[in-house]
Amino acid sequence: MKTRAAVATAPQTDLEIRDVELDAPRADELQVRIVASGVCHTDAIVRDQWYPVPLPSVLGHEGAGIVEAVGSDVQGFKAGDKVVLGPAYCGRCEQCLAGHPMFCVNFYDRNFGGGRADGSKSFSDDSGEISSHFFGQSSFAEHTNVVASGAVKVPDDAPLDLLGPLGCGIMTGSGAVLNVLQPQPGSSVAVFGTGAVGMSGMLAAKAAGATTIIMVDIVPERLEFAKELGATHTVNSKETDPVEAIKEITGGGVEYALDTTGVPPVFAQMTKSLATRGHGALVGAAKLGTEAPFDIGTLLLSGIKISMVVEGDAVPQEFIPRLIALHAAGTFPFDKLTKSYAFEDINQAFADSANGTTLKPIIVF
Ligand code: NAD
Ligand code: ZN
């Protein structure tokens, strides 16, 4: 069928909205009419080839839409179902079977491979094939074929123009906190980076009952906004040493911490700001090969734990409905992070995300 898609063609270059051909969904796929798709920092770094997804490519991995066709092997979905799209995973490896599909041993190939497992691509135009199946979905398109096992069915009255980011950015920050760090009520949490991922982590920490929530960033407006959304303390790490500040606020160190920046010196700050037997998690992405300094001499005695976390270590089919329920109950107001853009304005959405004026852009088709 004919559809329209935003195509990434080269690093640091605007996406091109093109008329493209979409092939038929395979037996294990759904064809979905995308209603809205969030824009994540990961779309920008893949456009810029930090991860070498073959270009040209249709990116987008926070899609929400309506099922239009169902592959012959797919069970549990019918045309007309509303879905939020999560990452692809094989469902058969030891990590998937152990309940950690975001650590699927085939995760990289399935999500960054540029097409289906058999090498085929869903999109093409006169210039040739265009990479598809980014995170199993390539949601910057009016219609797309998605891996059915990554789709999450949501209620008929669910607001699809809002929910796409639950499939990546929002799930990443909140899942790292709720699934991995698991702060106790009354505990202390520090979050480095106040983008959509960090703010989701903050909202999750608040929902979990943490009572000291420290947000660290270098952009004063973002810190101000973090305070409005519930941070008990903010630290501008351009002006103040965040390790000293966190130790002072918490009386010695913070129990749980999250680095959403992927900046090596910030990761080091996180490790140093933890309390004895504290737990820190890294979710911020860095170029492959990036190393961070880590004082193993001093930190051995601290008993701290560090986790590397992909997509909040969530099972999206279980976790996304819980986030929707928390949002409906008013305890997880992630809608305050979002701003809508028309499809034609997708490059403006990327620019506003990069320059920090919008935390979580959502493209509405
Ligand atoms: P963002 O760019 O909106 O937020 C990053 C924040 O970090 C910004 O507010 C920025 O000012 C702040 N920052 C940058 N350098 C800093 C420094 N030196 N000290 C303190 N703060 C600093 O991005 P986002 O959408 O919130 O995503 C955050 C990261 O998470 C990105 O790297 C993204 O690629 C990654 N990500 C990872 C996963 C995963 O599965 N692990 C999933 C989604 C996104
Ligand atoms: Zn993402």
Image (tube, helix red, strand yellow):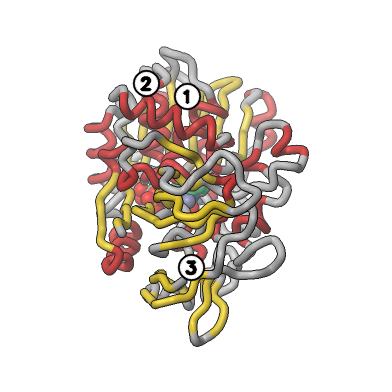
Dot 3 corresponds to which residue?
58
User: Quick check: is the Cβ at mark 1 less than 8 Å away from ligand 1?
Assistant: no
41 left or right of 129 in image: left
Expressed as whole percent of the image width and height from the top left, the position of residue 205 reads: 41, 25
How far from the left and from the top, in percent, is residue 50? 55, 65
Question: Spatial distance from mark 1 to mark 3, Cα to Cα?
Answer: 41 Å
Give the residue drawn at x 41%, y 43%: 82
- Amino acid type assigned to the residue bearing label 2 in the image: Thr
Q: Earlier in the sequence, mark 1 or mark 3?
A: 3
Q: Residues within 10 Å of mark 2 (few under 14, many from 20)?
A: many
Amino acid under disc 3? Val
Judging depth in this view, the residue of 344 and 52 nearest the camera is 344
Q: Are marks 3 and 2 in contact (CB under 8 Å)?
A: no
Evaluate if marks 1 and 2 touch, with contact meaning CB atoms under 8 Å apart: yes
Image location of residue 94, percent across then percent down: 77, 38
Identify which amino acid the numbered label 1 is placed on. Answer: Val
Q: Are marks 1 and 3 in contact (CB under 8 Å)?
A: no
Q: Residue extending furthest bottom? A: 126
Location of residue 123 in the rendering, given as x and y in whole percent from the top left corner:
52, 72
In whole angstroms, how far apart are the C-alphas of marks 3 and 2? 41 Å
- Sequence-earlier tag: 3 or 2: 3
Find disc 1 in the rendering and name its residue.
254
Left or right, residue 21 beside residue 129: left
